[in-house]
Image (cartoon, rainbow, N blue to C red):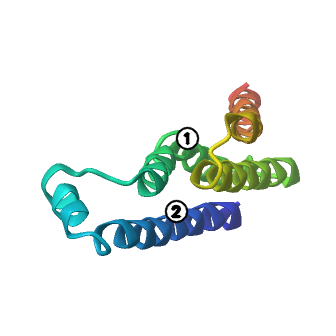
């Protein structure tokens, strides 16, 4: 259950590296842009998308990490929940890739939907497990 969580953490680390690269390109090639960024937080479109995607990683994925830990500590994790966890993570990688490149909603929305569905199923199994355990 922990490998998908680790994989998601590395997605976030990679996004921070990409944000640094894009901000550096925007701010250090233009002194005026650097001042605007420093004083008002103005971002180029390329770094803004990465920044928004990083913010996304602290929304729905927090429910993912919570359910992974709950599944593990209650012994409710099994092959199905591990597969769902990997589906969630692959969906997040796909969503992030589209978001920081083309940002085409046509491709981003299905990746989000797949991750969302996997997460709902994981929480659904958690509820079933707790109901069966507590009779």
Q: Going by the image, does 37 lie left or right of 101?
A: left
Q: Residue at x 57, y 69 (%)?
A: 10
Question: Where does the image place residue 11, in percent across and percent down from the top left?
Answer: 59, 64
Rendered-image quadrant of the N terminus:
bottom right
Secondary structure of the residue carrying numbered label 1: helix
Q: Residue at x 38, y 54 (%)?
A: 44
Rendered-image quadrant of the C terminus:
top right
- Residue ID for mark 2: 12
**Viewer-proximal residue among 94 and 39:** 39
- Residue ID for mark 1: 63
In the image, residue 15 sits, relative to residue 134, either above or below, namely: below
Q: Earlier in the sequence, mark 2 or mark 1?
A: 2
Question: Where does the image place residue 21, in percent across and percent down from the top left?
Answer: 44, 73
Spatial CA distance of label 2 from label 1 is 15 Å
Crowding around mark 2 (Cα neighbors within 10 Å: few <14, some 14 to 19, many 20+) is many
Q: Going by the image, does 29 lie left or right of 2?
A: left
Crowding around mark 1 (Cα neighbors within 10 Å: few <14, some 14 to 19, many 20+) is some
**Viewer-proximal residue among 95 and 65:** 95
Secondary structure of the residue carrying numbered label 2: helix
* Disc sitting over residue 91 in the figure: none
Place residue 64 in its image quadrant: top right
Q: Nearer the viewer, mark 2 or mark 1?
A: 2
Place residue 19 in its image quadrant: bottom left
């Amino acid at each position: 259950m922990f490998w998908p969580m680790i994989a998601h953490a590395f997605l976030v680390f990679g996004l921070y590296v990409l944000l640094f690269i894009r901000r550096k390109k925007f701010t250090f090639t233009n002194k005026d842009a650097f001042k605007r960024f420093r004083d008002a937080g103005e971002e180029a479109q390329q770094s803004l998308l990465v920044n928004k995607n990083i913010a996304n990683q602290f929304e729905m994925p927090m429910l993912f990490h919570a359910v992974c830990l709950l599944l593990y500590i209650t012994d409710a994790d099994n092959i199905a929940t591990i597969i769902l966890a990997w589906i969630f993570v692959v969906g997040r990688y796909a969503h992030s890739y589209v978001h920081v490149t083309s940002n085409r909603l046509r491709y981003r929305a299905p990746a989000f939907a797949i991750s969302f569905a996997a997460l709902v199923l994981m929480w659904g199994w958690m509820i079933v497990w707790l109901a069966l355990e507590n009779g």
